[in-house]
Amino acid sequence: ATGIVRLRVGAQVRVGAQVSGIVRKLNVSVGTHVEKGEVIAEIDTRQVDALIAQNRAQAVEDEVAVRKAERDVQRGTDMLTSGLLPRQQQEDLEFAANAARAKLEKSRTDLHAAEVSLSYCRIAAPISGTIASVATQEGETVASAFATPTFVTIIDSHAVELIAMVDEADIAAVRPGQTVTFTVESYPSRDLEGKVQRINPTATIVSGVVNYEVVIAIAGDSELLKPDMTANVSIHTSQRNALLIPMDGLRGSGDARYVFVETPKGPERREVTVGTRDGSAMEIRKGIALTDRVIVTEVSGGGKKREQP
């Protein structure tokens, strides 16, 4: 079958910024290889640092307010016990203390959110791979208010798969797990390997010919391959030992096929049953044995035919 190399679903990751700010440092360019966790870019942290300081000060102020409210509640309880304070005022003091605690909790949450935003100022690679595109430069301002801006696009190092278009006449023999060998135009003398992963259930019709997409997982040398390369694919649907002879040794046509076998009395004609053709050889299922010497017709230099076992 013929095939094409393409990117797997999810193999391309767009990396963006969670916070707004100026790009202070950009560590990659198109073609750069990055490892998972490596810092791709850094955003100016001054705005976030100021927000952290503001939230930290607010949290300290709210802690003081909570301590004061709790002291007022304790005093009110003592006065209520002595009959010097109405119960309503005591309840108001308790409500004020609860409100102060809630405000403190909100301040601490805001502080934590600001510290998380600070961590987002260092943008790290979520996967190992190669930088396919860069959409920003150092000194530019990114705004993440409405949509996360894409900094770079990373393609996984082992991101490609092979799609073979198999004719409907052959698809019944294809199964997941079968071994595949294929070549691409860039490396015509190099046999690459893979395994059938799945068969797409819907057909693709091209010029009236029904084909099914067979998805093949590439083994080994996927770094050599790039998306949209074309491939010549062989799916090994079965394997067996067979007796093969050169096509030049086979005579006749249709069901009446025969060969000449060398014997002590001279060439002897043998009727044979043929099987599958494999390139320039033909499988013989019946009629000769492995030890027989089949005569192959060749043309000599003078243009006359000669027999050679």
Image: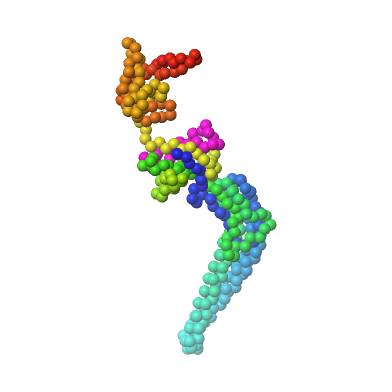
User: Which colour scheme appears in the figure?
Assistant: rainbow
Q: Is residue 116 visible?
A: yes
Q: Nearer the viewer, residue 155 or 180?
A: 180
**Up-down relation of residue 44 to residue 201 (above or below):** below
Q: Nearer the viewer, residue 282 or 224?
A: 282
**Residue 233 locus on image (x, y percent):** 46, 38
Q: Residue furthest top?
A: 265
Query: Which image quarter holds the C terminus?
Result: top left
Residue at the far right in the pictured view = 139
Looking at the rendering, the stretch of residues picked out in magenta corresponds to 173-195
| Residue 264 percent coordinates (x, y) | 33, 11
The residue depicted at 48 percent of the width and 87 percent of the height is: 88
Quadrant location of the N terminus? top left
- Horizontal side, residue 130 vs residue 257: left or right: right
Number of residue marks: 0
Residue at horizontal 46 percent and vertical 17 percent from the top = 299
- Note whether residue 214 is visible: no
Q: Quadrant of residue 47?
A: bottom right
Q: Main secondary structure of the magenta part?
A: strand
* Vertical placement of residue 206 versus 103, above or below: above
**Residue located at (44% from left, 16% from top):** 305
Please check the rendered image and state whether residue 160 is part of the magenta-colored stretch, yes or no.
no
Q: Is residue 25 left or right of residue 232?
A: right
User: What residue is rendered at 54% in x and 39% in y?
Assistant: 224
Residue 303, percent across and down? 48, 16
User: In the rendered image of this protein, does residue 90 appear above or below residue 14?
Assistant: below
Expressed as whole percent of the image width and height from the top left, the position of residue 214 reads: 43, 44
